[in-house]
Image (tube, rainbow, N blue to C red):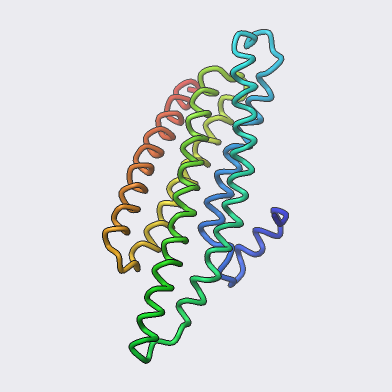
Amino acid sequence: MMRIEEFLDALASGAPVPGGGGASALGGALGSALGQMVANLTVGKKKYACWEGEIRELLGQLGRLQRRFLELAREDEEVFAPLAEAYRLPASKEEERAFKEQVMEKCLLDASLVPLEVMRAGLETLDILKVLEEKGSVMAVSDVGVGAQLARASVAGAAMNVRINTRSMKDRGKAEELNRKADEMLKRGMEQADAVYERILLRLS
């Protein structure tokens, strides 16, 4: 994985990757990293001793999620290359059109599955942040709120990337199945992230 400065420079360039998919995954990685910070500020404190084991377990889960998000950012770039190649395939003859459609369909499916995984990882992150909102260090509760919004952006951004690919699929049944999965996760993610954020805002008022 490139350094953050390199990633941002690449993101700002005219290159097609990294793009919104990689940025969504990075947002999730940032959210999970903030969750780890909160957990690290919680463990070892007498006030939270009764939750020590649980928080340590969540800390490990967040570390795995952070690594998963970075893996997905790389995978997002990897699935784009064959899709870009597929768009450039010739289609002047009937057999060429049939071959291009077959290749495109597979590439679009692959490109849709990666953001769905980003969404799943985002929801897992939000589940953990909700626990940290309740049991984590009160001194870092605002960081839980920031982490929740970063995870929210990850889920919402990845949903966009599902849609941009499924809209071009010829198999509309499969496309709608993927869209339904994305819509369900999007709804859950938005509601959960916003609920965490609003509760924390009230605590800070």
Q: Is residue 171 left or right of residue 150?
A: left
How many numbered marks appear?
Answer: 0
Image spot of residue 134 (x, y percent):
51, 18
Image spot of residue 122 (x, y percent):
49, 41
Residue shown at 35% from the left, 68% from the top = 168
Q: Is residue 10 left or right of residue 192?
A: right
**Which quadrant would residue 29 be assigned to in this image?**
top right
Residue shown at 58% from the left, 20% from the top = 136
Residue 26 position (above or below residue 15): above
Residue 14 position (above or below residue 196): below
Residue 151 position (above or below residue 114): above
Q: Is residue 89 left or right of residue 166?
A: right
Viewport quadrant of the N terminus: bottom right
Image spot of residue 128 (x, y percent):
52, 28
171 or 67: nearer the viewer: 171
Image spot of residue 119 (x, y percent):
46, 45
